[in-house]
Image: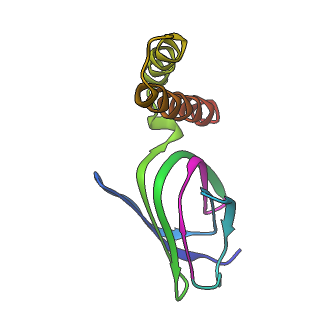
Amino acid sequence: MTNFPLKIVTPSGLVYDGEAEKLIVRTTTGDVAILARHINYVAPLGMGQASVTIRGEKRHAACIGGMVTVMNGAVTLVPTTFEWAEDIDVARAEHSEQRAKTVLENKDASETDLKLAEARLKRALIRQSVAAQK
């Protein structure tokens, strides 16, 4: 398979800078797969699993928010959060899930608290799902 240059940069810094064979990410309108020679493309990222194929090995990550761009064959992924499966703290994700569920069960929670808890729950479930694929 033909490679393309891929750079993954988060607000915390550079996560990956090298060659890749395939990138699959969740955009706000659904999943997109990027291969070498992809047309120029820009899309906002949603919350979901990303997979990157490097030298025939598929690596999984939790990828939340941000943008993906393809410009003249080079791919740049700029997510708000990007965690490789092996780096995910499963206990922390499970604790976050429980905290979110507690808020969602609270009949006195404000609309803002409920929306934040729903987002926290979704992130926690994504992280747990990705971590299971180590």
Relative image position of residue 67 (x, y in whole percent): 47, 64
Q: Residue at x 47, y 30 (%)?
A: 120
Q: Main secondary structure of the magenta part?
A: strand
Q: Is residue 51 left or right of residue 10?
A: right
- Figure check: 47 above or below 67: above
Q: Quadrant of the N terminus?
A: bottom right
Q: Percent from the top left, x then y, of residue 95? A: 45, 16
Q: The C terminus is located in which quarter?
A: top right
Q: Is residue 45 magenta?
A: yes
Question: Which residue is drawn at the image coordinates 68% and 64% (left, top)?
Answer: 32
Position above or below: 89 against 16: above
Front residue of 9/105: it is 105
- Magenta stretch in the rendered image: 41-56
Residue 60 falls within the magenta-colored stretch: no
Which residue is located at x 50 percent, y 35 percent?
119
- How many marks overall? 0
